[in-house]
Amino acid sequence: MIDVQHLHKSFGAITAVEDVSFGAHDGQITGLLGPNGAGKTTTLRILYTLLAPDSGHALVDGRDSATETMAVRERIGVLPDNRGLYPRLTAREHIRYFGRLHGRGGSALETQIDALIRLLDMQDIADRRTEGFSQGQRVKVALARALVHEPQNILLDEPTNGLDVMSTRALRTFIRRLRDEGKCVLFSSHIMQEVAALCDRVVVIAHGRVTADGTPDELRHATHQESLEDAFVAAIGTDEGIML
Ligand SMILES: Nc1ncnc2c1ncn2[C@@H]1O[C@H](COP(=O)(O)OP(=O)(O)OP(=O)(O)O)[C@@H](O)[C@H]1O
């Protein structure tokens, strides 16, 4: 369960997040949709304790990401925008390393690593160094690494960036499976189709502010639009910077 309350974050003269509030619930996929530069990544970075907000709160299962960082990190798995793999480590070593950082070890960790490798269908790459991996392979490693400590909340920053159609479909299936297991899934995207295809709730963000928040049906009603795409454009105020 994620609860973001009146977040504000500036970098010098640039206001990245003006005033952002929304909730994301267990057993649901919540999409953070907005054009480039809207403040999505900054909001996610605050949630996963990488940045401190200037004001406001980002709560994960009731824990404040600014003051209870360890408790938040234990409850959250993150696929960051920069997938950031170590080229000399194999896929399996990446997952193991992150498991150990979360205090896991022994045969329980090895069993969990094997399960993730099977679940993400990465048996063929598990023991290869990640140097030279394709985008799809890199996302799989980064996802497995994010899930190794079995977090209740999962943050995905533009998860299908750079993926082909087959990899995108496989990833969507995987994200739905996490939702069906009761996880709280929050992902950011500037691609309307992506959000329309996956989300139970949508939070539309533009210029550092939430401009609409609700189920796809609620958004259509609120903006008096027939199609979800038109509703998104109406909520953002322009179609600049977002993709169909
Ligand atoms: N570390 C930083 N220093 C300076 N400005 C920053 C920093 N991080 C973000 N910004 C600025 O804050 C604004 C919001 O950026 P952010 O990355 O949160 O947007 P976004 O919605 O994730 O965009 P995108 O879809 O392009 O990733 C942008 O104007 C960006 O240039």
Image: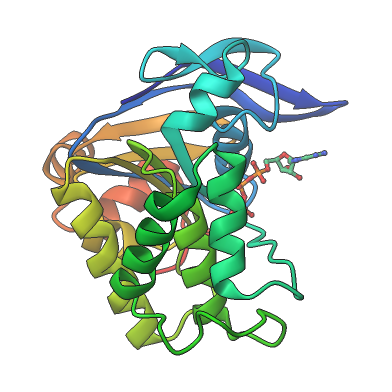
Q: Quadrant of residue 223?
A: top left
**Residue sitting farthest toward the front:** 106
- Residue 228 to residue 185: above or below: below
**Can residue 152 be seen by looking at this rendering?**
yes
- Residue 154 to residue 127: above or below: above
Closer to the camera, 207 or 79? 79
Q: How many marks?
A: 0
Q: Position of residue 154 (x, y in %)?
A: 39, 43
Residue drawn at 43 percent across, 43 percent down: 149
Residue drawn at 36 percent across, 43 percent down: 150
Q: Position of residue 86 (x, y in %)?
A: 74, 67
Left or right relative to 39: residue 132: right
**Can residue 19 be seen by looking at this rendering?**
no
Residue drawn at 67 percent across, 18 percent down: 53
Q: Position of residue 6 (x, y in %)?
A: 51, 13
Q: Quadrant of residue 2?
A: top left
Left or right relative to 150: residue 8: right
- Residue 63 to residue 178: above or below: above
Residue drawn at 36 percent across, 57 percent down: 112
Q: Position of residue 15 (x, y in %)?
A: 73, 28
Closer to the camera, 81 or 178? 178
Q: How is the image coloured?
A: rainbow
Placement of the C terminus among the 4 image quadrants: bottom left
Left or right relative to 14: residue 90: left
* Quarter holding ligand 1: top right
Placement of the N terminus among the 4 image quadrants: top left
